[in-house]
Amino acid sequence: MAHLFVPGPTDVAPEILAAQTHPMIGHRSQACSDLFARIQPRLRHVLQTGHRVYITASSGSGLQEAAVRNTVAHRLLVCVGGAFAERWYDIALANGLAADRLEVAWGEPHAPEQVAEALRRGYDALALIHNETSTGVENPLPAIAKAARTAAPDTLLLVDAVSSAGGVDLRTDEWGIDVLLTSSQKCFALPPGLAFAAVSDRALERAAAVPHRGWYFDFLLLEKYLQQNNTPATPAISLLYALDAQLDRILAEGLPARFERHARMAGLAQAWAEARFALFPRAGFRSKTVTTVTNTRGMDIVALSSHLARAGMAIANGYGPLKGKTFRIGHMGEITPDDVSTLLAEIDTFLDGGS
C-alpha cells in the first residue's frame, strides 16, 4: 500500500528504485548517449510536445530560474496566488529581472480576462503555476493560454507543472506553452533530483536574444548538448536509469488511463473532505493531484499525523500561513483509488475517537 500522501515526494515502485542500481557509466560514453536517446521521445510523448525536453539535475525551482533567465529581457508578469508562485516571483527578483505581480487571494484561480488585461501593458513572458500545491488550486490553463495568445501574441507562456505533469492532461504544443517545467518526484513517481522542461522553438529563439542567461541553465547550451544526446554537466545517471524504467511504466498504463486515475482519486478525496470538513480552493478549480482541506473542526493536525504515521501513512499540514488551518492530501504518482480510500478510512477512525 502506498504510504506517502503528501504533495511530493511520492512513493516509488520497488523496480524503479532498483533501476538506480545499474552499474555506473561514463557520462560522455556511448551508453549514456544511448540512454538519453531512449528517454527523449517517450518524455516528449508524456509532456505532449514535439519539441525538445531538457533534463537537468535539479529541482523544479531550478527550472523556474531557467525559464525566466532565458526568456526575459525587459519585464515579466508573474501570476501569484500561492507559495510556489511567490517563489517564482522571488527568483525573478533575485536574478535582477523586472517583474510585476498579478495577484489573487490564496485559494482563488487566475481568471483569463484578468491575465489578458494585464498582458496588454507589455511583457516578455507570463509565468503561471498550473497546480499550486500550497492551496490546492488548479488554474484554468487552456483558457488562460488562449487569452494570453489573443491579448499578447509575442508574450511567451511559462508554466510550472511540477505537481501536475504526468498526472493531468497538459497539451503543451496544442495550448501554445513555450516552457513547461516539471520535476521527477511528483506525478512521475521518481526519486527527487531530476527536472524536465519542454521548450518551444520560439522560446529558444528568444533565449538567443537574451544576454546573461547564466551557464548551468542556459537553453542554448542545453540545446547544443541535447543534439548529442547529452548534457553540459554530469547528469544524474542513476536517476536517468530510473526515469528510463518509469517511462515504460507510465506508457504501459497509458496517458488517458493515468489521467483518469488521478481524477478519480481527486474525486474521492474531495467528496470526503466536503462531507467531513470543507475544501479550501474555489469549486471548479480544484487540483487533481492534491486536495487542500479547510480544518473546520479545529482538529489537531499534528496528532492526526502521528496517528497516520503509526499506520504507515503520511499527509501534509497546511503550507506557510495555512499551517494548522488546512491540511493536504496528495494523490499522485503510483497511488491508487484503493490507497486513497484506505487513508480516508484511517482519518475517519481518528476523527471518531480511534487510536
Image: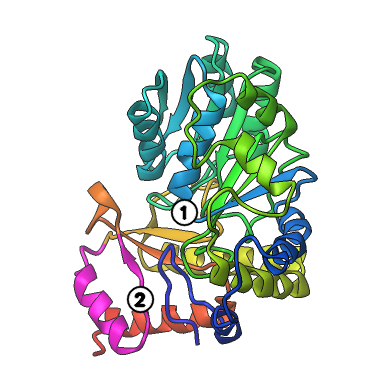
Closer-to-camera residue (160/298): 160
Q: Amino acid at mark 1?
A: Ser
- C-alpha distance separating marks 1 and 2: 25 Å
Q: Secondary structure at mark 1?
A: loop
- In which quarter of the view is residue 314 placed? bottom left
Callout 1: 10 Å neighbours few (<14), some, many (20+)? some
Q: Nearer the viewer, residue 307 or 245?
A: 245
Q: Say the numbered circle drawn on residue 314.
A: 2
Identify the residue at image location x=31%, y=82%: 308
Residue 282 appears in the figure: no
Label whose residue precedes the other's in the sequence (1 or 2): 1
Indicate whether 298 appears above or below 231. below
At horizontal 56% and vertical 26% (from top left) the residue drawn is: 71
Q: x, y percentage for residue 224?
A: 68, 41
Q: Which residues are magenta?
A: 297-317
Looking at numbered disc 2 in the image, what kind of residue is underneath it? Ala
- Please name the residue that numbered disc 1 is placed on: 58
Image quadrant holding the C terminus, namely bottom left
Name which residue lies at 55% across and 69% down: 239
Assign a secondary structure to mark 2.
loop
Pointer 2 local density, CA inside 10 Å: few below 14, some 14–19, many at least 20? many
| Number of numbered tags placed on the structure image | 2
